Image (tube, rainbow, N blue to C red):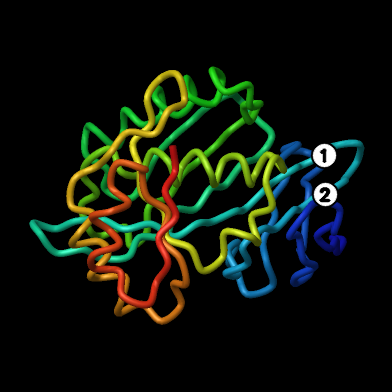
Amino acid sequence: EREYRSCQNLPGCQIVAPIVAQKSAKEKKLRMKWPDGTLWHGEEYVILSLYHDEMEVFAVLASVQSMGLTGIQGYPVTVEAYCVDGMPMFEIVGLPDAAVKESRDRVRSALQSSGCPLLQGTTVINLAPADLRKEGAAFDLPIALVMLAAAGEIDGAKLAGAAVVGELALDGTVRPVRGVLSIALRMREEKQVGALLVPAANAQEAALASGRIPVFPVG
């Protein structure tokens, strides 16, 4: 049993708690955990690099804020990305509907069309809270941004305090979404939100209800 610490070699990365890694010589399996048994410590961007008997485990955690809709009421959603070396896989969890599940293909196509690298290995996108149904295509843009942060293409720390919504076309352009007025009204109640990133076509609508929160159009 040996201890490792996360490395500090990418933008926004911070050293966090030690990790305990243990490998069974017979089973040839690697188990890793935080001392308190969890993997997520609320950091915006965490890099873990473990070396054990010539085996490397590379994992990335990144997050960005977004908003969901229940009827006409908005509620905050945290979009988290967990990326680790392994078999190629892209999963979205957190009670996504069919439109949200299809974000996998829209986001991958949009990133490729824009010349952005795609993450290799296993990528899991979590939409928290996981007990509320997520509907619509408004999570395309935050999913793309959190994947770019995990890939080191953008500084994930700069997204802290910003809420993001938007649908992506296959060529990478940002399309308008419904419910932006409700989203902007709900954002006014979130003290930790300092900016709202919305599709350019929705910017004027969002500005009517955003109050003190600045609105940034995304084209």
Quadrant location of residue 43? bottom right
Check residue 99 in the rendering and tell me which mark sits there, or answer none: none
**Would you place residue 104 above or below residue 61 in this image?**
above
Callout 1 amino acid: Glu
Could you say which is closer to the camera, residue 112 or residue 177?
A: 177
Q: As drawn, which residue projects farthest toward the left?
A: 71
Give the position of the N terminus as an image quadrant.
bottom right
How far from the left and from the top, in percent, is residue 37?
Answer: 60, 68
**Would you place residue 96 above or below residue 186 in this image?**
above
Residue designated by label 1: 56
How far from the left and from the top, in percent, is residue 150?
Answer: 64, 45
**Would you place residue 148 above or below residue 183 in this image?**
above
Residue drawn at 42 percent across, 28 percent down? 173
How far from the left and from the top, in percent, is residue 12?
Answer: 73, 60
Element at label 1: strand
Residue drawn at 47 percent across, 72 percent down? 194
Residue designated by label 2: 50
Label 2–label 1 contact, CB within 8 A:
yes
24 relative to 111 in the view: left or right:
right
Circle count: 2
Callout 2 amino acid: Leu
